[in-house]
Amino acid sequence: MIEKSQHVMLCGEGAELFAREQGFEAMPASYFETEYRREQLRDVQKRNEISLDHNDHKYGTVGCVARDSRGDLAAATSTGGVTNKHPGQVGDSPMIGAGTYASNTGAAVSATGFGEAFIREIVGRDIAAFIQLAGLSLEEAVRRKVMVDLPPIGGNGGVIAISATGEPVLMFNTPGMYRASISEGGEVKIGIYAD
Ligand code: ASP
Protein backbone atom coordinates (compact mmCIF):
# COMPACT_ATOMS: atom_id res chain seq x y z
CA MET A 1 0.00 0.00 0.00
CA ILE A 2 2.68 2.42 1.09
CA GLU A 3 4.53 1.75 -2.20
CA LYS A 4 1.50 1.88 -4.51
CA SER A 5 -0.67 4.67 -3.07
CA GLN A 6 -0.30 7.80 -0.99
CA HIS A 7 -3.28 6.79 1.15
CA VAL A 8 -2.90 5.09 4.50
CA MET A 9 -6.25 3.29 4.44
CA LEU A 10 -8.93 2.26 1.95
CA CYS A 11 -12.14 0.36 2.71
CA GLY A 12 -15.16 -1.27 1.06
CA GLU A 13 -15.66 -1.10 -2.69
CA GLY A 14 -12.74 1.30 -3.12
CA ALA A 15 -10.37 -1.15 -1.45
CA GLU A 16 -11.64 -3.95 -3.70
CA LEU A 17 -11.19 -1.74 -6.76
CA PHE A 18 -7.62 -0.95 -5.65
CA ALA A 19 -6.87 -4.66 -5.18
CA ARG A 20 -8.16 -5.44 -8.69
CA GLU A 21 -6.11 -2.53 -10.12
CA GLN A 22 -3.04 -4.11 -8.49
CA GLY A 23 -3.80 -7.41 -10.23
CA PHE A 24 -5.27 -9.39 -7.34
CA GLU A 25 -7.85 -12.04 -8.19
CA ALA A 26 -11.28 -11.59 -6.52
CA MET A 27 -13.30 -14.57 -5.30
CA PRO A 28 -17.07 -14.62 -4.73
CA ALA A 29 -18.26 -14.67 -1.09
CA SER A 30 -19.30 -18.30 -1.55
CA TYR A 31 -15.61 -19.23 -1.91
CA PHE A 32 -15.13 -18.47 1.80
CA GLU A 33 -18.09 -20.54 3.00
CA THR A 34 -17.18 -23.79 4.70
CA GLU A 35 -19.34 -26.29 6.55
CA TYR A 36 -17.16 -25.74 9.64
CA ARG A 37 -17.93 -22.01 9.73
CA ARG A 38 -21.65 -22.55 8.88
CA GLU A 39 -21.84 -24.94 11.83
CA GLN A 40 -20.13 -22.37 14.07
CA LEU A 41 -22.67 -19.74 12.98
CA ARG A 42 -25.66 -22.04 13.64
CA ASP A 43 -24.21 -22.90 17.03
CA VAL A 44 -23.75 -19.31 18.26
CA GLN A 45 -27.10 -18.24 16.74
CA LYS A 46 -28.80 -20.96 18.79
CA ARG A 47 -27.28 -19.47 21.93
CA ASN A 48 -27.97 -15.92 20.69
CA GLU A 49 -24.29 -15.04 21.15
CA ILE A 50 -21.57 -13.25 19.28
CA SER A 51 -18.26 -15.10 19.39
CA LEU A 52 -14.75 -15.03 18.05
CA ASP A 53 -13.67 -17.70 15.58
CA HIS A 54 -11.58 -19.58 18.08
CA ASN A 55 -11.30 -22.77 20.07
CA ASP A 56 -9.80 -23.30 23.51
CA HIS A 57 -6.27 -22.72 22.29
CA LYS A 58 -6.25 -20.08 19.63
CA TYR A 59 -7.92 -17.16 17.96
CA GLY A 60 -8.20 -17.14 14.19
CA THR A 61 -6.16 -14.04 13.58
CA VAL A 62 -2.89 -13.91 11.65
CA GLY A 63 -0.72 -10.91 12.48
CA CYS A 64 2.79 -9.82 11.60
CA VAL A 65 5.12 -7.07 12.77
CA ALA A 66 8.54 -6.29 11.32
CA ARG A 67 11.47 -3.89 11.43
CA ASP A 68 13.63 -3.59 8.33
CA SER A 69 17.33 -2.72 8.04
CA ARG A 70 16.52 1.01 7.68
CA GLY A 71 14.58 0.98 10.95
CA ASP A 72 11.13 1.21 9.37
CA LEU A 73 8.46 -0.58 11.39
CA ALA A 74 5.38 -2.25 9.86
CA ALA A 75 2.33 -4.12 11.16
CA ALA A 76 -0.41 -6.13 9.44
CA THR A 77 -3.38 -8.07 10.80
CA SER A 78 -5.81 -10.45 9.10
CA THR A 79 -8.72 -11.07 11.48
CA GLY A 80 -10.20 -14.47 12.12
CA GLY A 81 -13.49 -12.67 12.27
CA VAL A 82 -16.44 -12.50 14.61
CA THR A 83 -19.25 -15.03 14.20
CA ASN A 84 -22.90 -13.81 14.24
CA LYS A 85 -21.86 -10.15 14.27
CA HIS A 86 -24.25 -7.40 13.24
CA PRO A 87 -23.74 -6.34 9.60
CA GLY A 88 -21.39 -3.39 9.54
CA GLN A 89 -19.52 -4.30 12.72
CA VAL A 90 -15.90 -3.21 12.50
CA GLY A 91 -13.34 -5.04 14.61
CA ASP A 92 -10.05 -3.76 15.97
CA SER A 93 -7.93 -5.53 13.35
CA PRO A 94 -8.45 -3.02 10.50
CA MET A 95 -8.71 -0.08 12.90
CA ILE A 96 -5.37 1.72 12.76
CA GLY A 97 -4.26 2.45 16.33
CA ALA A 98 -6.39 -0.28 17.92
CA GLY A 99 -5.54 -3.79 16.62
CA THR A 100 -2.92 -2.69 14.10
CA TYR A 101 -0.41 0.14 14.43
CA ALA A 102 3.15 1.06 13.49
CA SER A 103 5.20 4.14 14.29
CA ASN A 104 8.97 4.20 13.76
CA THR A 105 9.68 5.98 17.05
CA GLY A 106 7.23 3.86 19.05
CA ALA A 107 6.46 0.30 18.07
CA ALA A 108 4.70 -1.92 15.55
CA VAL A 109 1.77 -3.82 17.07
CA SER A 110 -0.69 -6.47 15.85
CA ALA A 111 -3.42 -7.76 18.18
CA THR A 112 -5.76 -10.72 18.50
CA GLY A 113 -8.67 -11.18 20.85
CA PHE A 114 -12.00 -9.66 21.83
CA GLY A 115 -11.83 -6.69 19.46
CA GLU A 116 -14.41 -4.47 21.14
CA ALA A 117 -12.12 -4.21 24.19
CA PHE A 118 -9.04 -3.61 22.04
CA ILE A 119 -10.86 -0.71 20.35
CA ARG A 120 -11.91 0.81 23.67
CA GLU A 121 -8.32 0.58 24.90
CA ILE A 122 -6.74 1.85 21.62
CA VAL A 123 -4.15 -0.84 22.27
CA GLY A 124 -1.65 -0.32 19.45
CA ARG A 125 -1.39 3.44 19.76
CA ASP A 126 -1.27 3.32 23.57
CA ILE A 127 1.69 0.93 23.47
CA ALA A 128 3.57 3.29 21.14
CA ALA A 129 2.56 6.31 23.25
CA PHE A 130 3.78 4.70 26.49
CA ILE A 131 7.19 4.36 24.82
CA GLN A 132 7.26 7.79 23.18
CA LEU A 133 5.67 9.87 25.92
CA ALA A 134 6.25 7.96 29.17
CA GLY A 135 9.63 6.36 28.41
CA LEU A 136 8.44 2.78 29.06
CA SER A 137 10.23 -0.15 27.41
CA LEU A 138 8.22 -2.12 24.85
CA GLU A 139 7.90 -4.99 27.34
CA GLU A 140 6.52 -2.64 30.04
CA ALA A 141 4.15 -0.94 27.60
CA VAL A 142 2.75 -4.23 26.28
CA ARG A 143 2.41 -5.64 29.81
CA ARG A 144 0.43 -2.59 30.91
CA LYS A 145 -2.11 -2.96 28.06
CA VAL A 146 -2.39 -6.77 27.89
CA MET A 147 -2.14 -7.64 31.60
CA VAL A 148 -3.55 -4.54 33.32
CA ASP A 149 -5.88 -2.51 31.09
CA LEU A 150 -7.58 -5.19 28.97
CA PRO A 151 -8.61 -7.96 31.42
CA PRO A 152 -11.09 -5.88 33.49
CA ILE A 153 -13.15 -5.09 30.39
CA GLY A 154 -13.12 -8.62 28.97
CA GLY A 155 -10.17 -8.02 26.67
CA ASN A 156 -9.02 -11.62 26.33
CA GLY A 157 -6.22 -11.93 23.80
CA GLY A 158 -2.72 -10.78 23.13
CA VAL A 159 -0.38 -8.80 20.92
CA ILE A 160 2.81 -9.27 18.98
CA ALA A 161 4.98 -6.15 18.92
CA ILE A 162 8.43 -5.00 17.88
CA SER A 163 10.35 -1.97 19.11
CA ALA A 164 12.36 0.65 17.21
CA THR A 165 15.50 -1.29 18.17
CA GLY A 166 14.08 -4.58 16.87
CA GLU A 167 13.24 -6.22 20.20
CA PRO A 168 10.15 -8.46 19.83
CA VAL A 169 7.53 -8.86 22.59
CA LEU A 170 4.78 -11.50 22.21
CA MET A 171 2.37 -11.39 25.16
CA PHE A 172 -1.14 -12.70 25.91
CA ASN A 173 -3.55 -13.02 28.82
CA THR A 174 -5.12 -16.26 27.51
CA PRO A 175 -3.79 -19.81 28.04
CA GLY A 176 -2.01 -19.73 24.68
CA MET A 177 -1.23 -17.80 21.49
CA TYR A 178 0.40 -19.37 18.44
CA ARG A 179 3.48 -17.25 17.85
CA ALA A 180 6.97 -17.06 16.40
CA SER A 181 9.76 -14.54 16.00
CA ILE A 182 13.05 -14.35 14.10
CA SER A 183 15.92 -11.98 14.84
CA GLU A 184 18.41 -10.37 12.47
CA GLY A 185 20.90 -13.09 13.32
CA GLY A 186 18.36 -15.78 12.42
CA GLU A 187 17.45 -16.86 15.95
CA VAL A 188 13.96 -18.39 15.81
CA LYS A 189 11.54 -18.65 18.74
CA ILE A 190 8.24 -20.53 18.47
CA GLY A 191 5.56 -20.95 21.12
CA ILE A 192 1.94 -21.94 21.73
CA TYR A 193 1.33 -21.83 25.52
CA ALA A 194 2.83 -19.51 28.11
CA ASP A 195 6.60 -20.00 28.54
N1 ASP B 1 -9.67 -9.04 17.10
C1 ASP B 1 -10.53 -9.58 16.09
C2 ASP B 1 -11.82 -8.83 15.99
O1 ASP B 1 -12.44 -8.55 16.99
C3 ASP B 1 -10.86 -11.00 16.32
C4 ASP B 1 -9.66 -11.85 16.12
O2 ASP B 1 -8.80 -11.91 16.99
O3 ASP B 1 -9.59 -12.44 15.05
O4 ASP B 1 -12.23 -8.56 14.90
Image (cartoon, helix red, strand yellow):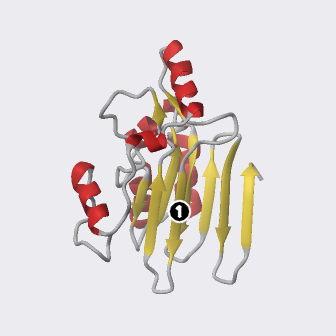
Q: Quadrant of the N terminus?
A: bottom left
Can residue 137 be spotted in the picture?
no
Q: Is residue 28 above or below residue 169?
A: above
Asked which secondary structure carries label 1, the reply is strand
Name the residue: 70% across, 44% down. Answer: 176
Q: Position of residue 52 (x, y in %)?
A: 53, 34
Name the residue: 32% across, 30% down. Answer: 87
Which is more toward the observer, 169 or 28? 28
Q: Amino acid at mark 1?
A: Cys
Please indicate whether residue 25 sits to the left or right of residue 110 in the image: left
How many dots with numbers? 1
Which is more toward the observer, 77 or 37? 37
Badge 1 crowding class, 10 Å Cα cut-off, few under 14, some 14 to 19, many 20 or more, is many
Name the residue: 65% across, 34% down. Answer: 55
Q: Is residue 48 above or below residue 114?
A: above
Name the residue: 70% across, 80% down. Answer: 186
Q: Position of residue 117 (x, y in %)?
A: 44, 37
- According to the picture, the residue beneath numbered tag 1 turns out to be 64
Please indicate whether residue 149 sits to the left or right of residue 102 in the image: right
Can residue 124 be spotted in the picture?
yes
Please indicate whether residue 125 sits to the left or right of residue 79 in the image: left
